[in-house]
Amino acid sequence: MFKCKRKYEYIEVMVATGRGGDDRSKMKRLIIDLDFKSQFELAKQTEVYKDVTQMLPTVFVATEERLKRVVSLVCGEMKESMKKEGMSRPCLLYTSPSPRDA
């Protein structure tokens, strides 16, 4: 995950995972990002990175675990793309343990 110094907004929703929806112990936290894809735009990018980001949805809805996996994958490709294109890593990105810190 990345923590930006600028304000970043997303929606958190708790949904019941059981059939009846009554059991509070079976709640799942979902993250909804209404502008997910644009967060990974780069001025210069490799073809691999372009392919990866084209697969990203504009509106992202998933569990926190899935979000972490997707962001990790995309950021790994971003790092490689920036390296190959001779770009330095932006100083405003820092590792963060949770999207709640974003």
Image (cartoon, helix red, strand yellow):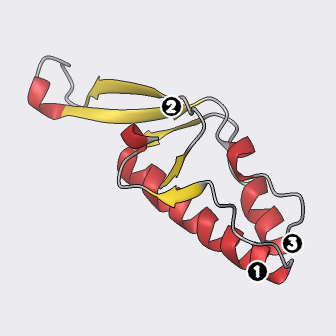
3 or 2: tag closer to the N-terminus: 2
The percent position of residue 74, horizontal first and vertical second, equals 62, 63
Single out the residue that lies furthest toward the bottom: 84
Viewer-nearest of discs 1 and 3: 1
Pointers 1 and 2 in contact (C-beta within 8 Å): no
Badge 3 density bin: few <14, some 14–19, many ≥20, Cα 10 Å: few
The foreground one among 64 and 10 is: 10
**Residue 66 screen position, x and y as percent:** 43, 52
Residue found 78% across the figure and 52% down from its top: 41
The answer to which of marks 1 and 3 sits earlier in the sequence is 3
Task: Identify the secondary structure beneath mark 2.
Answer: strand
Question: Is residue 97 or residue 20 the one in the foreground?
Answer: 97
In percent of width and height, residue 67 lies at 47, 50
The disc at residue 83 is 1
Residue type marked 2: Ile
Q: Which residue is mark 3?
A: 47
Q: Which residue is mark 2?
A: 32
Q: In whole angstroms, how far apart are the C-alphas of marks 1 and 2?
A: 30 Å
User: Is 63 above or below relative to 79?
Assistant: above
Q: Amino acid at mark 1?
A: Lys
> Which comes sooner in the sequence, label 1 or label 2?
2
Q: Secondary structure at mark 3?
A: helix
Real-space Cα separation, disc 1 to disc 3, in angstroms? 13 Å
Residue at image position (69%, 46%) is: 39
In the depicted structure, whether residue 30 falls above or below residue 80: above
The image quarter containing residue 82 is bottom right
